[in-house]
Image (cartoon, rainbow, N blue to C red):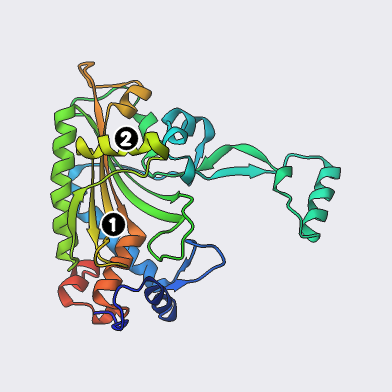
Amino acid sequence: MTDDAHDPYDPRAFHDALAAHGLIVPTAVKGGWGRGAVFEDILERFDALVMRGAAGDGAEAFTFPPLIAREMIERLGYLDNFPQLIGSVHSFFGADAVARELSQRVHDGQRWDDLLEPTGVMLLPAACYPVYPLFSGLLPDGGRLVTTRNWCYRHEPSDEPTRLQSFRMREFIRVGPPAQVEAWRDDWLQRALTLLRGLGLAAASDVANDPFFGRAGRMMATSQREQRLKFEIMVPVISATRPTAICSFNWHQEHFTSTFGIRCADSAVAHTACLGFGLERVVLALIKTHGFDTAAWPADVRTQLWPA
């Protein structure tokens, strides 16, 4: 158990204890703390455990940079649904005189960001987004399965330790006939629950919704829940009554296949679904559950994460 026993679900106490044990490194950026060597070791060990469990699935593996084309974000409809989360990359395109003005403003303590202009890229908000264009056209028989691990960005500055602006996701993306995609999603929901509970986590699943923006977004969130298109696996980390989502499952139906012209081998409608492990959140859940000293974690947990 953790040693912040005075209030086991005090987010500030948990953050401070993580820092005191060298697991995280506070920075000036909210939701942008650094990771210590032990934290990173746990993360890598968990990711390796997931990949060992998925080895028989035959997923194609890809890695992408934490950037995505601005045009792709527009095409995916992300700005329609989640404008509050986006991160846009801006840079300097001016001449020498404007560069001197920018420098002077910095030294004078004035705003200077209006002298920058948007580039052609944005920060990647979801690990699966670069994958969908790979599927364009007719799929092979049985569809395709891809896995990727990417850094993601979402503009959610917070002092709460599980809400990061920059984080890593291990995702699996399935595309194929609708019935097969739904069955894959349901199967992996049970597999993920078994895996996480096997690590001693009090994991439970429930229907969920994405953080759609505005009044229209509230209607979309209701529809998403009613159709049971999104599930999350949650573990108490900073609250007993509001557990933290550490794994999510999204069934997109035709959203991406219609956008990128993806069809089954027989030209029938194809669907996509994805599952994602929030790697930092899983590590935080393990630490919260088993304590700050990994050497004192239960033997069966250590055996899974640090096999001989």
User: Left or right: where does residue 242 sit relative to residue 126?
Assistant: left
Q: Position of residue 41 (x, y in %)?
A: 35, 68
Between 275 and 59, the residue placed more toward the observer is 275
Q: Is 8 placed above or below 77 here?
A: below
Q: Amino acid at mark 1?
A: Ile
Q: Quadrant of the C terminus?
A: bottom left
Q: Are marks 1 and 2 in contact (CB under 8 Å)?
A: no
Residue at image mark 2 = 219
Q: Secondary structure at mark 1?
A: strand
Mark toward the start of the polypeptide (1 vs 2): 2
Q: Quadrant of residue 2?
A: bottom left
Between 64 and 247, the residue placed more toward the observer is 247
Residue at image mark 1 = 246
Q: Could you tell me which residue is drawn at 21 percent across and 69 percent down?
A: 307
Q: Position of residue 171 (x, y in %)?
A: 31, 46
Q: Secondary structure at mark 2?
A: helix
**Of tags 1 and 2, which is closer to the observer?**
2
Q: Label 2 crowding class (10 Å Cα cut-off): few <14, some 14-19, many 20+?
A: few
